[in-house]
Image: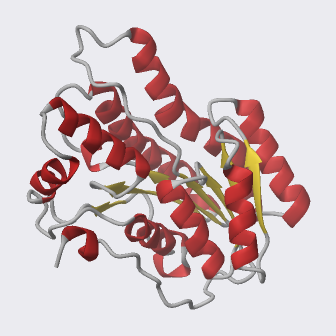
Amino acid sequence: MSLDAAAHELKPSVTARFNGHTSIVVGGSKGIGKSTAERLAQEGSNVVIADIDPGVTETAATLAAEYPSVTVVGTVADITSLADCERVVSETTTQFGSFDNVVVAAGVVNNPADVVTLPEAEWNRVFAINVTGPFLFAKAALPVLKGQGHGRIVLIASFWGRVGQALFSAYCASKAAIIVLAQSLAAEVAGDGVTVNTVAPGMTNTDLHRQALAEEAAKRSITFEEFRDQEYAHIPLGRSADPVDIANAVLFLTSDEARYVTGASIDVNGGVLFR
């Protein structure tokens, strides 16, 4: 079986375990965030998708048409703006009364460079989106979640937040920061019935991942397929994750099955890193 065939799209069975819930997915226009929004809708949750990408409204419209039993709306928002974060929370509570789950999947990778040549502006850009953004959205959402006495927050980290990689200091450091930020938040709100956790994906078959593979393959003067297969050979399970593999871990952490899990980080990396 080819690696492409192995990395098949999964269609999980629907259990409707989120009936009556409302979930906010930040960075839900594409990739892991989009797959998470779809899985939540499949399981009965209303979904508010926020993304700086104007295509978020089209993503929401497509999901709304596919899952007419729930309400899916999209809004353009910049996670690095506290005003935008507060607006998303306000619009969600106005339309739905409240919300139960917050998933922050927005993130960027730094342009590869060693520390000496990495521009300060690039470092600041990565941290603004990957760390300050989740902090600001938690700042906006937690008063609602604490006030109602329950809620789930899940932040998307990375296996590169567990071990440094040359040329990606900003990205690795930012994802490590996310894991510890979630632990701090979890400690602060445990008494309010709110849990905070992270999911740390490995290589995941998203547009961003495929673009990175293609760029590196070009630098090495080999085909995309050759470089992809070399990279995937290092993964014990033999393939990259599908976005839905990450989304399923997020759904567990937002479900009642994970009500006693907080401050945790779940590795979903195909066995490429054990700890």
Q: Residue 136 in the image: x percent, y percent?
A: 63, 36
Q: Residue 263 in the image: x percent, y percent?
A: 41, 56
Q: Nearer the viewer, residue 14 or 227?
A: 227
**Which residue corresponds to the image point at 33% horizontal and 57% vertical from the top-left?**
204
Say which quadrant the N terminus sits in.
bottom left
Classify residue 41 by image quadrant: bottom right
**Which residue corresponds to the image point at 42% horizontal and 64% vertical from the top-left?**
243
Classify residue 236 by image quadrant: bottom left
Q: Nearer the viewer, residue 247 or 241?
A: 241
Q: Residue 28 in the image: x percent, y percent?
A: 59, 54
**Which residue corresponds to the image point at 34% horizontal and 25% vertical from the top-left?**
111
Single out the residue that lies furthest toward the right.
Answer: 94
Q: Is residue 2 above or below residue 129?
A: below
Q: Answer with left or right where residue 91 lies relative to residue 265.
A: right
Q: Answer with left or right where residue 238 lies relative to residue 268.
A: left
Q: Residue 131 in the image: x percent, y percent?
A: 48, 34
Classify residue 212 by image quadrant: top left
Residue 154 seen in this snapshot: no
**Which residue corresponds to the image point at 90% horizontal and 57% vertical from the top-left?**
94
Residue 243 seen in this snapshot: yes
Q: Nearer the viewer, residue 61 or 168?
A: 61
Say which quadrant the C terminus sits in.
bottom left
